[in-house]
């Protein structure tokens, strides 16, 4: 096995320069196999699947209210599609095979075109057999720029991924192993962060915006800092109304967090970005700090609000979503493809988790909501694992213990044994997938959908 601690000290290579995806420029997003330096330089290159020849795929930047237009070309040997995670877009552009579009066959293509109503940090990724396609590298950042961005010296996207690699830095081919699917997912042995653009030094008192994206298929990452001090300003793309002074946050798979931080490390020290682990942690980035001639910055303000409604917590319908199964979950039966199967039969079909008694896509939606209505979903986790529940096409708010409403999110971690209630306005018509973003769990049953009419 590779030594993660040693690995964690270097940044992976293979950085792409940010590029603008303009409307009508004939932009192409091409999925193909490639070789990339993912592990540190003393290791060989890794065979990956990727967009536009890099992992992460090209950083797509669009203006808020602008349009993203791209032709997806599938040069993989298997079908694929692209999902634009966190974007409140038109349903037909959501990229879910069998629900919103036909899967794109090898050598096939699909034209994506949608407007981006909300500024913030989003991402795109493959949505066919995603537990393998995403793990092999099919993802990239999607940055929607504010009309007036906050005043910072550096705007850096930090893509975190968790790789399961062999000693020669090749992706292990053990996808779909029931032991992974039924536990905490397919956890890797190499945690890496790529900074886009790459930055080789900072100056004391500079202000940076860091946009974290956890692209890992299953791993929860707790990021923190040394020598950087400031505030969390956005979660899952959406600005916090009040910034939160903190030096860490937890990112479940697919979650994003934006921080605005000032460099407080002294000259010739380092600014560190860390992944806190039970046994200490890994350094995800170590950036030297130079030249202390800048003066300290003022307060960190909230980002401008996005055009999304806040809910007050009252709902017109409440439909619980109950999670069962997994290892030590005592699953006895479940409905699979409309048939009631016992536990053994479910496992023979690769299923080990259920949502409201269904394993895999149910025949009917979890709920049907009329456009503009307010919906509440208590997320009841009866399992002994955490789940990162992601709703397509909508952001929701959690009703917190004191009755107030949490920030807008598109993915929420519900820990073992926990119930969290989410509330949202069903404002976006269409069939929207709702699934665990621990993609191994999704593969083994944890998905359903909502119908907004
Ligand atoms: Cu990030 Cu169903 O997706
Ligand atoms: Cu899960």
Image: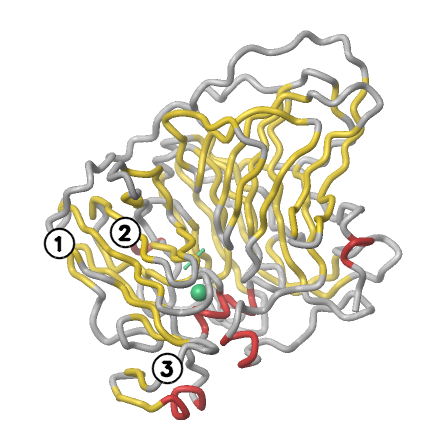
Does 123 sit left or right of 44 as displayed? left
- Residue at left offset 68%, top offset 66%: 164
316 on left or right of 20 = left
**Distance (Cα) linking label 1 and label 2:** 12 Å
In terms of secondary structure, where does tag 3 sit? loop
Residue 141 appears left or right of 404: right
Residues at marks 1 and 3 touching, judged by CB atoms closer than 8 Å: no
Please name the residue that numbered disc 1 is placed on: 317
Q: In this view, does 212 lie above or below 320?
A: above
Q: What separation in Å lies between label 2 and label 3 (alpha carbons)? A: 23 Å
Residue closer to the observer: 25 or 45 = 45
- C-alpha distance separating marks 1 and 3: 28 Å
Identify the residue under disc 2.
421
- The answer to whether mark 2 and mark 3 are in CB contact below 8 A is no
Secondary structure state at the residue bearing disc 1: strand
- Disc 3 marks which residue? 331
Q: What element carries label 2?
A: strand
Left-right relation of 186 to 423: right
| Chain-order first, disc 1 or disc 2 | 1
N-term-proximal mark, 1 vs 3: 1
């Amino acid at each position: 096995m590779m030594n993660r601690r040693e690995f964690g000290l270097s940044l992976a290579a293979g950085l792409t320069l940010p590029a603008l995806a303009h409307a009508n420029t004939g932009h192409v997003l091409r999925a193909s196999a490639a070789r990339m330096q993912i592990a540190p330089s003393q290791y060989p290159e890794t065979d990956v699947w990727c967009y536009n020849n890099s992992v992460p795929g090209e950083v797509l930047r669009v203006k808020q209210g602008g349009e993203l237009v791209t032709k997806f070309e599938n040069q993989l040997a298997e079908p694929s599609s692209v999902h634009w995670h966190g974007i409140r877009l038109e349903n037909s552009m959501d990229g879910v095979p069998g629900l919103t579009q036909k899967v794109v066959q090898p050598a096939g293509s699909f034209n994506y075109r949608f407007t981006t109503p909300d500024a913030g940090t989003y991402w795109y990724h493959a949505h066919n057999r995603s537990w393998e396609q995403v793990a092999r590298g099919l993802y990239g950042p999607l940055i929607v720029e504010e009309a007036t961005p906050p005043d910072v010296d550096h705007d850096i996207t930090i893509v975190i991924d968790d790789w399961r690699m062999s000693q020669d830095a090749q992706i292990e081919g053990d996808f779909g192993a029931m032991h992974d699917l039924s536990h905490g997912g397919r956890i890797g042995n190499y945690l890496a962060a790529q900074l886009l653009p790459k930055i080789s030094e900072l100056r004391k008192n500079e202000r940076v915006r860091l946009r974290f994206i956890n692209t890992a298929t299953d791993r929860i990452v707790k990021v923190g800092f040394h020598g950087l001090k400031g505030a969390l300003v956005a979660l899952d793309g959406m600005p916090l109304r009040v910034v939160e002074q903190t030096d860490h946050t937890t990112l479940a798979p697919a979650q994003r967090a934006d921080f605005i931080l000032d460099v407080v490390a002294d000259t010739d020290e380092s600014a560190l970005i860390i992944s806190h682990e039970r046994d200490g942690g890994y350094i995800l980035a170590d950036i030297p700090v130079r030249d202390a001639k800048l003066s300290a910055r003022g307060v960190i303000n909230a980002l401008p609000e996005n055009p999304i409604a806040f809910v007050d917590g009252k709902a017109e319908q409440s439909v619980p979503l109950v999670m069962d199964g997994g290892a030590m979950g005592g699953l006895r039966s479940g409905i699979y493809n409309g048939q009631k199967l016992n536990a053994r039969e479910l496992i023979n079909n690769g299923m080990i988790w259920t949502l409201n008694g269904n394993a895999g896509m149910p025949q009917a939606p979890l709920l049907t909501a009329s456009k503009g209505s307010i919906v509440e979903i208590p997320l009841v986790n009866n399992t002994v694992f955490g789940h990162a529940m992601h709703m397509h096409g909508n952001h929701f708010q959690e009703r917190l213990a004191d009755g107030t409403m949490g920030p807008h999110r598109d993915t929420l971690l519900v820990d073992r044994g926990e119930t969290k209630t989410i509330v949202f306005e069903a404002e976006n018509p269409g069939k929207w997938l709702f699934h665990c973003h621990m993609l191994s769990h999704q593969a083994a049953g944890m998905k359903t959908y909502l119908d907004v009419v």
